[in-house]
Amino acid sequence: MTIDSPVSAYGRAAARLFDQLGKVYEDTYGQLPEQLTAIHWLLDRLPPQAKVLDIGSGTGRPTAQLLADAGHRVTGCDVSHTMVTLARTGVPQARFAWVDVRDLPEAPGTWDAITAFFPLLQMSRAEIVDTLGRIGRWLVPGGLFVMSTVPFDAEHAELTWMGHTSRASSFAAEVYPRLVRDAGLSILRQHESVFHPDYPGMGAEQHLFIFATKPGDPSRAAPAAVPSHHRGPLEPNARHWAAMEARFDRQDVPLIVDSLSVNTRVLALGGRTVAVARDLADRLGTADAGPDGLQEEEDGRMLGALGVTLLPGAADRLPPVDRSFDAVVAAWTLQRTDEPDFAVAEMARVVDPGHPEAKVVLVQDAPDNEIIGLWNGVRAPLTGAPADPQGQLLLRAAHVLSAHGFDDIAVTRLPIDVVFPEAGPEARARAAARALTALWNVGHPQPVQLHHALLSALRGHFCAGTDRITNDAVMLLARPRR
């Protein structure tokens, strides 16, 4: 079967509408700010020459064009013959198929990323659910999905839009996250926005954007698994770390805690796990924590007041409590151990593998985030320090957990940005250089040189118009295979 075939009957109403609109749609919606932000978010995370499916590709601009211009292999599909013709002419570096996504054959594990900017509105509710499920199957493990829609609680609602009468279906905004999760995807972030189309007679539109990933093989979440050996423990500068953390725009802790929502006896270990243990105790009423990584005595007192029991030992020398927990969570812990493989084995030892919700949850920095890039590209060469080991730590952990029976492994990316709201690129670059120099200056004999080297790199970064540096993490969740 060729996918370049005429659309089926149930796509013809949408086809007629968009055949009439043609380039007018691009003129009205082609520079939608939140959609452009979503595309650039995707561009920052795709592997080279990624295979991307753009559902409801329209004229090919901006989505297919921006992705194809970056070297990715893009296929767009649309029910409108007019739209496909415009796309093939305007974006020749991508491929476009005149086909309804509901007619596409099953293709499990085919796409590195899938985008769907507003096409779900042209379906029934049952078809929306079915299409999201197919998207979940079509993505490779670790693949990314970005969607947008207009949330409202109705099916086949008649409305006037861009001067035409049409029918549209949707769900309330709070329903879509569940539908995306039911499709086997993990939500990385979501937000709503208001758009004012520049078209006669049209009012403000409420838009919902969801960014998600398909949990999968850790090698996809850690493409830069270097160095090949552990560099040894790295102690954080507690005071300056707190100043950096205050700048975080983070969505990681709720996702970590959600992964443990059905567990009842959780051990939280070290690193930056204080916030995780605190939120777990708030949700579960109790939790246990290892003191490894508690940077201040008041951290321990605060956790104790919340019902968290502090256990003796550290991540690589846990007390003799075999199979005492139904879950262990260790956030940013492995790089602080002398023997990370042994630490992971210890975590597997204290979890009861027979418990129906048994799991080990590990969180480390994503090896391709921009903070890691600055360490490896600026700090490490200047000082002779080893490269950052985050990806290598996760891959080793996956092998150790598999050897201990925790071989059902899923990986989820956790979005974290470090925000510099200072006015203008130069002020942001200087603030970021000061913050990173202070954070990384432990034992550094050349703080002035480090500051200047970081400032040079950061000026180019902030001149691109951003006010943040990505510091995404990766969550590895391992269960015994049932």
Image (tube, rainbow, N blue to C red):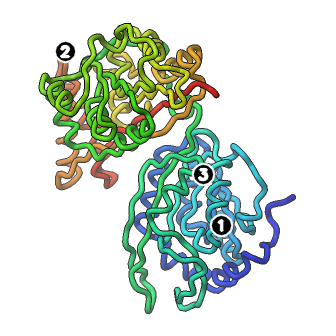
Point out residue 237 in the picture as x, y percentages from the top left corner.
Answer: 19, 23
Q: Quadrant of the N terminus?
A: bottom right
Residue 238 vs residue 318, the one in the foreground = 318
Q: Residues within 10 Å of mark 3 (few under 14, many from 20)?
A: some
Res. 140 image quadrant: top right
Can you see residue 211? yes
Residue situated furthest right in the rendering? 1
171 lies above or below 476: below
Q: In the shown orientation, is residue 49 left or right of residue 338?
A: right
Q: Which mark is residue 443?
A: 2
Res. 410 image quadrant: top right
Q: Which residue is mark 3?
A: 183
Report the amino acid beneath label 2.
Gly
Q: Residues within 10 Å of mark 1 (few under 14, many from 20)?
A: few
- Tell me whether circle 1 and circle 3 mark residues in contact (CB < 8 Å): no
What is the secondary structure assignment of the residue under circle 3?
loop
Residue at 30%, 29% (x, y): give it: 273
**Label 1 vs label 2: CA separation?**
60 Å
**Label 3 vs label 2: CA separation?**
48 Å
Residue at 54%, 30% (x, y): give it: 356
Residue at 38%, 7% (x, y): give it: 320
Q: Which mark is residue 126?
A: 1
Q: In the shown orientation, is residue 387 left or right of residue 19?
A: left
Sooner in the amino-acid sequence: mark 1 or mark 3: 1
Q: Quadrant of the C terminus?
A: top right
Res. 379 image quadrant: top left
